[in-house]
Image: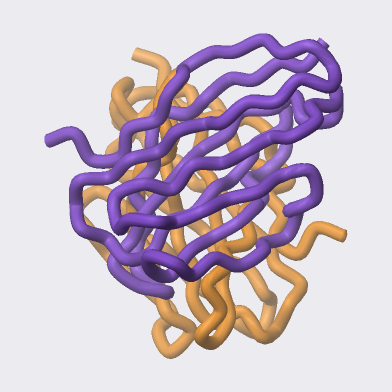
Amino acid sequence: DQQVKQNSPSLSVQEGRISILNCDYTNSMFDYFLWYKKYPAEGPTFLISISSIKDKNEDGRFTVFLNKSAKHLSLHIVPSQPGDSAVYFCAASKGSARQLTFGSGTQLTVLP
Amino acid sequence: NAGVTQTPKFRILKIGQSMTLQCTQDMNHNYMYWYRQDPGMGLKLIYYSVGAGITDKGEVPNGYNVSRSTTEDFPLRLELAAPSQTSVYFCASSTGAREKLFFGSGTQLSVL
């Protein structure tokens, strides 16, 4: 039973346009969400996070939106660059739990 | 800046063989983790440690063992390798329970 779902395995976007990556969760106890980016043959690297007390968090070109009522979060990348081509994972945790629950990832390809 | 170092990068095992995946971090992080990633799936937590001498099971601990004798090292032991353990293994560390994870570059393990 996947508690964190990324329903789009892949996404292609033109350079300079907006990339929107989506993530849905089923466990209402999740209160902290993170996005990680992964290049081939490398480990994931932290991108941005958001607590459930917020509905938006920005860091440069990256913005994460959280809709608690819909149990949905999204990552916006504006403008998209070819170097953003990678697999993006969303992850969630609850309370003081030390475990992160990861989604299956979305392969983003930014076309020059 | 070494960060989290995993060895080996690749390994092929025969069914029933044993091996240890090594993980070392130089960031003085108390928390360390082992994840596995199967094709098309998210990362799943195998074991984690909140400090030297303290380890705990994650979501998928069966078939694995860990130890944490020092802050820096967190080896993962496979005692009797099975084809179901074919996966990419990632070690990670963090400063705390809800802090971002720093990942190693992974170990690709095939059990044939």
In the rendered structure, the colour chosen for chain A is orange
B53 and B8: which one is in front?
B53
A39 over B57 or under it: above or below: above
Decide if residue A18 is in sight here.
no
Identify the residue at image location x=28%, y=45%: B25
Q: Nearer the viewer, residue A57 or B22?
A: B22
Q: Say which residue appears at 52% left-offset and 31% top-offset.
A: B21
Which residue shows up at 75% across the image and 24% down it? B86
Q: Find residue A43 and report its horizontal and vertical position in percent.
A: 42, 34
User: Can you say which quadrant of the picture contains the C terminus of chain B?
Assistant: top right
Q: Residue at x 28, y 39 (%)?
A: A79
In the depicted view, which residue is nearer to us: A104 or B90?
B90
| Left or right of residue B23: residue B80 | right
Residue B32 is drawn in which quadrant? bottom left
Q: Nearer the viewer, residue B1 or A53?
A: B1
The chain letter corresponding to purple is B
Q: Considering only vertical position in the picture, is A48 above or below B51?
A: above
Identify whether A76 is placed above or below B76: below
Query: In this rendering, is residue B56 above or below A82?
Result: below
